[in-house]
Each structure stands twice: as structure tokens, then as C-alpha cells.
Image (cartoon, rainbow, N blue to C red):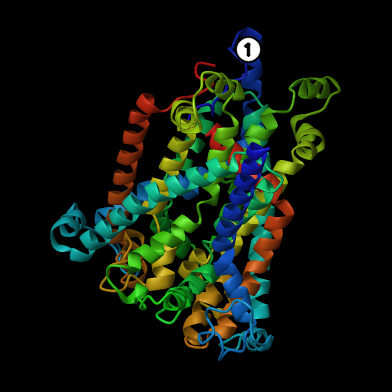
Amino acid sequence: MLRLAKNRAGISAYHIAMALFGILMIYPLLWMLSSSLKPSTDIMITTGQLIPRELTLENYAYGWKGFGGMPFAAFFKNSIFVAAVRVAGTVFSCSVIAFGFARIPFRTRRFWFMAMILTMCLPGQILQIPQYILFNRLGWVGTYLPLLVPSFFGGAFNVFLLVQFMKGIPLELDESAKIDGCGWIRLFALIIAPLVRPAMATVAVLTFMASWDDFYSALIYLNKPSLYPVAYALKLYSSEVSTNYGPMLAMSVLSLLPVLLLFFAFQKSLVEGIGTVGIKG
Amino acid sequence: MPAISQKRAGSKPMGLAARLKKNNIAAGYMFIGLYVIGFFSFVLFPFLYSFYLALTDYDVLTPARWVGVDNFVKMFTADDLFWKSFFVTVKFAVVQVPLKLLVSLLVALALSKATKLTGVYRVVYYMPSIVGGSVAVAMTWKQIWDNSGLVNSALGQLGIPAVRWLSNERTAIYVLILLGVWQFGASMLIFLAGIKNVPSSLHEAAIVDGAGPVKRFFAITLPMITSSIFFNLINGIIGSLQAFNSSYLITSGKPLNSTLYYGLQMYRQAFDHFKMGYASAMAWFMFVIIVALTVAVFRSSSAWVFYQDEGR
């Protein structure tokens, strides 16, 4: 009886500790949300109070008007456009490439696969400057092309993820399709591609999130406010309204919404995906 | 990275199979062709070009001028900011990588016992990793650690005087390190997957032998998850040496360059001063450091990393 009680106390202590730690972990995000709903003059005075004295949407209304003649809606539209093209390009090119690696036995396949794995370990910084010069020569700086075009040529990590997934499909499927007179293209488009849809969804979600947060490409390649995505616009906005935190926090909250919504919709496959990559790696 | 190239059994080329492979070469390249084109234009060419650039003086507007190893000589002997940013980055990595490993391992252990709420905790602890790299969070982090921000106001309620976190040369870097450690979720998930892979029979046998939880952790769990530690360690080192965002967005390298990451200094050389050659030389120096560290960790791994499916 005593042991049971002791055990119960232990379990409650465990949950209390885990919950407190959880609150601490998301406190910065809660603070961001709560502050964005406070009257702008209250934010730094009532920093310690999570529950606003007075709820208001004035920061959202003010922030949404944007800056430099561009409303925030335009930045959102830019981000959505860039992310959509990148997602389409990445999912298409990576699944085509992964099919080649996973299902077609041909000479030099192993060589290219190893080359791809090696590029995964290559620090991206070393490629940035020459890539910039290349895109500058092509006259692409100041347009979306440097952000969009590379996604149509596969990405090592995503191809790898899809290859692992495709290898799990029994080879007999290919053989019987071949006997039925099915060529590689139809085998890919009609049989394999539909079967790897869950992995494609993971690739799509990861690509969208990375694209949404990417302010670096905008910093380097874009030079017109009319092209700026949300992430970069937010950075500029924060210096624009430097002491007026309310609108900045409100736009921050909005900018996180798409990523958070996707995360909650796909958290199961994302959480599992990260775990398996670690094990396989 | 082991276990990547699991060859399909029975693909040893023999007569017919070899001919089949030859026939497939066109089909193969039709599918991986996009990758091959991308590899040459966005990876191999820039990689080689970057090495050439490192040996030149190039400002984008006038043609590149060959200067040999001058960039490197200048970097090592006459550029205080180069060394400053290098040591800032080393400090950042040396503190952040082990701290993040430790926190993510401890939290993974606390989560390894399945309860009804484990899924909820896992999502909540992982959330900062999802949003932590964004501009929005960086801006919020800046407010939280501001002189009159959340942290100082919380300290004030405890009667502790305010600290000028971001304008103090000694504390600013730790604010950025903490932002990184806060995003321990991804490595926690990798540890969790590793812990789940430990056969429960090992623990049961140890319990029969009277081993307590601490002993079991050091004798069973820790040796069995060394491959996850290895993966997180490599990722952590490479990531922290290339860090850029938090320094650029939160402190701009201030105060007194105490948060000037190597990545930020390189960016400034390239895109503020348009010294493309010099910045490429910086990139190559960091590349060599990263390769050397990665090789060292890989070499040492045979001594401490244990793979469950070894030899399979």
C-alpha cells in the first residue's frame, strides 16, 4: 500500500516536472503571442504578465499595413509563390532521381549515389560565393531564379530519404510490371510514385518549411521590396519600427502560423522521419 | 555514414545481368540526369571555382586578378577580425555542441518511459526546433533578453538586479548559445529513436542481476546509443561552425565583435566589401577545419561507436 502511494507520488512528480519544463520551452512563443495582443504601450511595461490586461488587435492592423509602400499581404504572397515552386520542383525532381537510384540497376549508379552522399557532407558556405557569381553572370540576381531553379535538380537529403523509402517496396512489383510490358516511365509514374506518396508529403513539408524560413537567399539575391518574402521583410521591418515592438511581434506571430500549422498537421510523420534518418545515418 | 549503401542481394554482374545493366544505362541517366546536371552546375563547378577564387582578388565588377596565396597570408598574419571571428565561433561550438547533446540526451531519457502524455511532451519539446531558426523567433529572442525584457523583469521579481545581456561583451554570446540549445528537439528525437532500439531483454537481464537504473544507463543504454551520439555530434559540429543567423539577426556581431561568427565575417567580406576572393579563402579555411574535424571524429568512432547491425 505504501509502495503504491510512493509510486503514485513519483509519477505525479514526474509529470509536474515534465509539464513545467514544457511550459518553459514554449514560454518564449507564448510570450510572443500574448505581447502581440497587448496594447503597444503595455508590452515592455507588463513584460512579466502573460495574460494581457487588455486584448487588442491594433498591432495586427498596424503591422499588416506593412512598410515602404508594401503591405504585409504582398510579402506573404511572395513567400507562398516561392515556396510553392520550390516544393513542386523538389518533389518532382527528387522522386524522379530517387527512382533511378532505387529501382534501375545500371553501371555508374553506385558512383553517383556515393557522390551525392558526399555532397551532403559538403558545408554549404563554400558554394555560396561561386554560386552568387554564377547567378550574377547569368543576370539572375534581383530575380527569383536563383531561389527557384536549383530546386529542379534534386537535393541530396530529399533524394536519399525517397531512395530509402523506395527500396522498401518489393522488387517483384517491377518484375511483374515488366512482364506486362510496362516501361520504366510507366513503372515510375503509375506504380512506384503513388506508393511513395507519404514520403513525398514529408519532402514537401520539409521543403516548404525550409523555404518559408529562408531569409538568406533573399538577403543575397533580392533587391526590390516588391519581391521580398515574409522572413526577410520581417527582418527589415524590425529595424523600421525599432521601438514599436507590438506590430513587429504581431507580424512575427503571423509569419510563424503556416509553419506551425503544417507542423501540427504532419507532426507524426515528421517526428518519425527525423528519428529514422538518425538511425540510418 | 554507414548502412547507406545496402547493396541489393544478388546484383553481382554475371553475363545476362551485366548486359541488362548496360541496356539500362540510358534509362538510368534519364532518371538521375537531373541530379547529374545539378551536380556539375551547382556543386562541382562552384566547388572548384571557389578554390580558384580563393587565389584571386575579385570584386565582381573588374576581372579577377591572380594573387596566389596572398589572401591566406593576409588572413593569418594581418587580419585581427579573421582570428576574432574564428575564436568566437570555436567558443560558440565548444559550449553549444556538448551542452545541446547533454540536454537532448537527458530529456530523451526522461521521455523514454512511455506514458499517456509522452506524445504531448515530445511535440512541445520539439516545437522550438521547428520555429527556432526563423527571423520571427530571433526578433523575439532579442526582445526577451533586452535590458527591460522578459528575463530581466523575471529576475527583478526575484530581487536580482538586471543584467545587460546583449550589450555585455561577456554575456551576449551565451544568449545566442542558449537560442541554439533551446532547439535541442531534433537531436532529442534521434536519441529517443536510438533508446527505443535498445533490446529490452538486455535491461530485463540486468534487472534480474540487480542492476539499478543508473548502472543500467552506463552499462547498457549509453553504449547502445553511441551511433546516435556520433550522428548528433557530427551534425552539431558542422552546424555550429557554419552558424550565421543568430549573430546576423540578433547582435550583428556586437558588442565589441564578441558575437562575430565566422559565417558573418565571411558574409561581410563577400557581400558588404565585395572581396569575393578573400571571402572564398575564408570559406576554404573553414572547409579544411570541418573536414579535418569530421575525419577525426570518424577515425575515433571505431573506438567508441557501436553499431547494432555491424557486419550485416
- Type of amino acid under label 1: Gly
Give the x, y percent position of residue B36.
Answer: 54, 40
Give the secondary structure at mark 1. Answer: loop
Asked if residue B164 shows in the view, the reply is yes
Position of residue B208 relative to residue A279, above or below, is above
Write the residue at 61% across / 55% down: A16
Q: Where is residue A7 drawn, in percent x and y?
A: 63, 41
Identify the residue at image location x=40%, y=64%.
B176
Query: Which residue occupies the extreme front position in the image?
Result: A2
The answer to which quarter of the image holds residue A74 is: bottom right
Residue B308 appears at what percent x and percent y? Answer: 52, 22
Depth order, front residue of B91/A281: B91
> Are there few (<14), some (14-19), or many (20+) residues within 10 Å of tag 1?
few
Nearest to the observer: residue B185 or residue A194 = B185
Give the camera-side residue of B43 and B170: B170
The N terminus of chain A appears in which quarter of the rendering? Answer: top right
Q: Is residue B167 left or right of residue A67?
A: left
Q: Residue furthest right?
A: A180
Left or right of residue B252: residue A152 = right
Residue at the spot x=52%, y=67% of the render? A215
In percent of width and height, residue A229 lies at 59, 71
- Residue holding disc 1: B10
* Residue B307 position (above or below residue A199): above
> Residue drawn 60% across and 8% down?
B14
Q: Looking at the picture, tell me which residue is in the foreground, A201 or A193.
A: A201
Instruction: Name the chain letter of the residue that bears numbered label 1.
Output: B
Q: As drawn, which residue projects farthest toward the left?
A: B77
Q: Is residue A229 visible?
A: no
